[in-house]
Image (tube, rainbow, N blue to C red):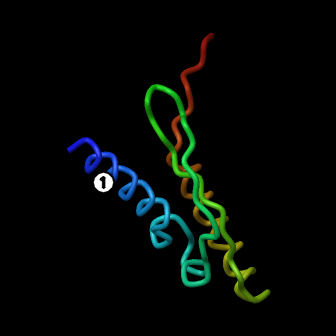
């Protein structure tokens, strides 16, 4: 039973990490590959999946990817809440 729970947790974590549709901009999703995966102890009994991979794209796709990353970063900044001022 414990072995099955551990296997399920590891499989779930690795599937989440390789979900390129959720993690990468559209210009890179179809061109990304994972070369290796390892697990890292993050403390408190938790594991993280560390993935190493590559994206092979043309220079035109790289420019599109850059603009998509910038759009994503811009949207993320709009929704960040600044901490209250301590005056």
Question: Does residue 40 sit above or below 38 in this rendering?
Answer: above
Q: Where does the image place residue 66, in percent across and percent down from the top left?
A: 71, 72
The residue drawn where x is 33% and y is 46% is: 6
Quarter that holds the C terminus: top right
Answer left or right for 23 relative to 55.
left
Q: Where does the image place residue 3, in percent across and percent down from the top left?
A: 29, 46
Q: How many marks?
A: 1
The residue at the far right in this view is 59
Q: Where does the image place residue 5, in percent across and percent down from the top left?
A: 27, 46
The residue at the far top in this view is 87
Residue picked out by circle 1: 8
Question: Does residue 81 sit above or below 14 in this rendering?
Answer: above
Badge 1 local density, few (<14 within 10 Å), some, or many (20+)? few
In the rendered image, which quarter is residue 24 located in? Answer: bottom right
Answer left or right for 22 relative to 78.
left
The residue at the far left in this view is 1
Q: Nearer the viewer, residue 61 or 50?
A: 50
Answer left or right for 8 relative to 46.
left
Quarter that holds the N terminus: top left
The residue drawn where x is 51% and y is 36% is: 81
Q: Where does the image place residue 53, in percent across and percent down from the top left?
A: 66, 68
Q: Nearer the viewer, residue 75 or 59?
A: 59
- Where disc 1 sits, the SS reads helix
Question: Does residue 25 sit above or below 1 in this rendering?
Answer: below
Question: Does residue 65 sit above or below 79 in this rendering?
Answer: below
The residue drawn where x is 36% and y is 57% is: 12
The residue drawn where x is 71% and y is 83% is: 56
């Amino acid at each position: 039973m414990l072995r099955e729970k551990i296997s399920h947790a590891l499989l779930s974590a690795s599937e989440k990490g390789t979900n390129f549709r959720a993690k990468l901009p559209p210009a890179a999703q179809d061109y990304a590959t994972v070369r290796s995966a390892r697990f890292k102890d993050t403390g408190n009994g938790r594991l993280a999946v560390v993935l190493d991979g590559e994206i092979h794209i043309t220079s035109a796709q790289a420019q599109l990817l850059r603009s998509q990353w910038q759009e994503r970063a811009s949207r993320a900044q709009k929704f960040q809440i600044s901490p209250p001022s301590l005056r």
